[in-house]
Image (cartoon, grey):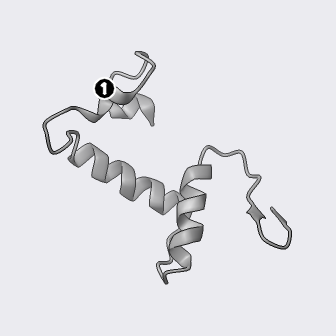
Amino acid sequence: MRRDDSVKTIEDHDGNCQFAALSHQAKRLGILRSPETMRKKIVDYLKSNPYYGDGFPLLEHLADDDFSCWDEYI
């Protein structure tokens, strides 16, 4: 991790960068969750709610047909 005057750069290349960013910002609101916990909670939510409000399946947004189910994507 590197820090300068205005930006905190997280350089871990563990596949959790988006969740690390969410965890970092949530901490500013007093929500203390690790990136791994954030990932699990978000993925669990998406698994439980696989459709948009209009009924459109979220998996349709994956550009690569190699991911036919959540377990393969994760």
Q: Quadrant of the N terminus?
A: bottom right
Q: Secondary structure at mark 1?
A: helix
Q: Is residue 31 left or right of residue 20?
A: left
Return the residue found at the far bottom: 30
Q: Residue at x 55, y 77 (%)?
A: 27
Q: Residue at x 13, y 36 (%)?
A: 55
Q: Is residue 19 left or right of residue 64?
A: right
Q: Residue at x 49, y 81 (%)?
A: 29
Return the residue found at the far top: 65
| Residue 15 in the image, given as x and y percentages of width and height | 61, 43
Q: Which residue is mark 1?
A: 60
| Residue 68 in the image, given as x and y percentages of width and height | 34, 21
Can you say whether 42 is above or below 7 in the image? Answer: above
Q: Foreground: 59 or 41?
A: 59
Q: Is residue 65 left or right of residue 49?
A: right
Q: Quadrant of the C terminus?
A: top left
Q: Residue at x 59, y 69 (%)?
A: 24
